Structure formats: C-alpha cells, structure tokens
Image (cartoon, helix red, strand yellow):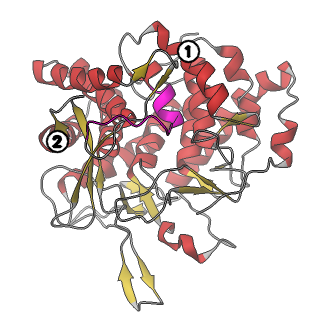
Amino acid sequence: MRRAALARIGMLSGPLLSMLFITPAHAEQSRPQLEQVTCAALDRAVQSLADGPVLLASYPAFEGHPPAIIALRGVAFTYDNALASIALFGCGKALSASRIADALAYATDNDPDYHDGRLRNAYAAGPVKPHGPILLPGYWSQERNAWNQDAYQVSSATGNQAWAALALLEAFRQTQAPRYLQAAERVLLWTQRNTYDSQSPAGFIGGFYGYPPNPLRQGWKSTEHNVDLAAAWAALDRINASADSAAQAQIARDFVDSQWVATEGRFLIGTLSDGRTAEHQRSGLDAQIWPLIAVSNPSADWARVFTFIDQAHRFGAGYGFSRDPDGLWTEGTAQAAAVAQLTGATDKAKQLWPVLMAQRSADGWLFATPQAQISTGLAIGPDSTSNDFFYYHLPHLGATAWAAIAASGVNPFTGAQEAN
C-alpha cells in the first residue's frame, strides 16, 4: 500500500447520516457540482505555487491535529500527485496537469541516491528546482534534535511506480512531449528488472522499503500493485507497441487473474511475504474494484465484486478501506463511484456523488474521512509493530483527485473518457 496516514473511531457523522436519504434529483445534481469543486481546488493548488514543476502536499492542513502525524507535513506522495495530474487532464486543466507530470519526470533522473529510474514513495511538496537532486520529505524532531526521514516515504513501492508511469503516459498522450514517454519507460524498466518474481503465482513484488543504500526487498505480491502494472505496461504498449511491454502486462494480468476467487465473488488482496501463500483474511477495496476498469477485457464475472463490497466494505452510505471498516474512506468511495459509472452501474454511482460532496472542506478539497481517523488493517512497513496505516480527518489530495476523476468520467488507467 502507499500512503502513511493513527486508531479507531466508527460513528457516522451528521452529513453522512443525511446521505442515507438521498433524493434522485439531489444525486443527479451532485456529480457536476463535485466535478466543478474538485477540479477548481486542484487547479488552484497548482496555480498557487511558483511557475515550473510542482508537487502538491498530500495533506495541506494540519492546524489542531495531533503531533503524531507531523511526519505527513509538507509531504507530496507520488501516488497522490500522479492521480492529481491525471485528474487535472480530465478536468481540462492541461497546464496544471503538466506541471505535476514535469516534476515526476524530473524525479526519475534526479534522485539524490539512486540513478536507476526508480521513484520514491514521496517527495518534499512545493516547486521543484530545475537543477540538482529532487528534495525528499523530512522534518526536524525536537525530541531527537535531529532531522528525521520517514522510512516508508523514502522507499519505492511497486504500485507507486506504476501510478507515476500511468500519469506520465497520460501526459504524453495529451502533449506528445517525449520526456514523459522516456520517463515512464525508465520507471517501468526499473520495476521489470527489480520486482519480478517467477515463483508461482508469478508477478511483481511489493518493492523496496527503507533507507539507501540497501533497502529491504518486500517479497509479498499485491493484487492492487499488479493491477497497476498491468494497466501501465498495457498503456505503454498502446503507445509504443513491443513484445516486451505486452509480456510484462500479461505477467501482471495473469497474477490478477490468479487472485480471483469465483466461489466468493472477490479478489484476494495478494500473497504473504513469501510471495507464494495466498492471503485470504484481509481485503482492500481498491484491489476489489480496480480490475474492472484497469485491464483489457475484464471477466464479466468480476462484476460480482459489487455484491462483495456491499457486504464487506460498506460504511454508512459509502465504503471503507478494509473488511468490516471502522469509518468511511472518501478516496475509496470515489473509486467505487468511478468504477460503477465506467462499468454502467450508474444507479450505484449516483448514490455516491452526494456522499462525496458532503466531505468538502472549506477550500474545496475533500477530507480523507469524516471520522477523526480510520484504520486500513495494514502495516506501513516491515518494521511496524502493529497495523499502523491510517487515514485522518484532513483534506486529502488523493481523495480530491479520485473524486475529480470519478465526476469527470475519466478512466485513470487508460485516459479514456466516459462515453456520453
């Protein structure tokens, strides 16, 4: 998984309760309002920064929140920014979208430690200087009287590489600027050389965790990561067809296929750390629904995941991250709206637009959750002593970008717009 985001609160907020009684007219009006609000918020965030390449802070507002999340201050997660770039292209804001894509392209060639095309999970938010290494996130610890860097943020997760490549390939489709294609190829080549695992079920591992020069190999395989890579390699193959790109896309797709459990109508989340043993207990909303719009010719049987997520991931009028969730996950609810809309389940999507609109903050960004904090049931890294990957009641770039993607009708894996 991707973003470091602390414990459990599970009560529905007032706005969410009101969403249980949505009129058809209200639902219909909420989608264009959501698109307008989120597209404008993302564009303003980019335009508020100096000209040139930029990376947006994933959590821009921290006032009044506990010091335990100081590690998120001023952090631009790669995944969130890739989403924001894709969303902005879908919003018709090509200039702002390109400025984020420029920053991602710059990062592939200007890492302070590595020179192999990999990207970090996060960078320092703000304008990206055109010369010298790209800045990594960190913060001054008063307790230690030292500069701290978060181990996850300076790591390189496979899914984040794929999403950056998807954003760069969308930037190339939109602009035909060769730098975007070259950067995407460089990132994907790193995943091919460093994350492929041939043991059954063959696929791509989680990536590498920790500080240079010797981060730890994460041998588990994620359904979500392989969905991302299947989409990214296929997108590259559509632009610049090659047997290698097609083969890599097929490897990732075959892993995704292997994780479908027909008797339960759902996808497994992936494997355990040995890369072989299936993980049956946990479930992630994204791994359930992304395959429906990310891979070519998805199985018609996969549409049954909507029944599964309504049973396992529902929270109030929306959805939570994990099985039996302790709160609403705004980003995931937007993902569900996007997938439902793009697969023709428009009535299901329609009920989610007002839920998303209810999560607006004052500046138009969407809160990651209406609860104070929610759990994903996952650990951030191998050095975690508990499942410490959480989301907070903070305006969140990823949630805002997914809402814009969903409302604008763009498929973030292919760049295709919803047919009218």
The percent position of residue 314, horizontal first and vertical second, equals 68, 33
Tally of numbered tags: 2
Rendering coords of residue 180 (x, y %)? 25, 38
Q: Amino acid at mark 1?
A: Arg
Q: Is residue 15 left or right of residue 292?
A: right
Please identify the quadrant where the C terminus is shown. top right
In the image, what residue occupies the spot 57% across and 26% down? 338
The answer to whether residue 349 of the structure is visible from this angle is: yes
Magenta stretch holds residue 254: no
Which of discs 2 and 1 lies nearer the camera? The answer is 1
Magenta residue span: 275-290
Q: What residue sits 51% from the left and 69% below the top?
A: 73
User: Residue drawn 55% across and 59% down?
Assistant: 59
* Magenta-drawn stretch contains 283: yes
Q: Which mark is residue 186?
A: 2
The secondary structure making up most of the magenta span is loop
Amino acid type at mark 2: Arg
- Position of 113 compared to 141: left or right? left
Query: In the image, residue 120 lies at what x, y percent?
Result: 29, 56
> Mark 2: which secondary structure?
helix
Picture coordinates of residue 19 (x, y %)? 83, 35
Measured in 3D between alpha carbons, the distance from the residue under mark 2 to the one under mark 1, in whole angstroms, is 36 Å
Indicate the quadrant where residue 51 lies: bottom left
- Checking the image for residue 304, the label placed there is 1
Q: Secondary structure at mark 1?
A: helix
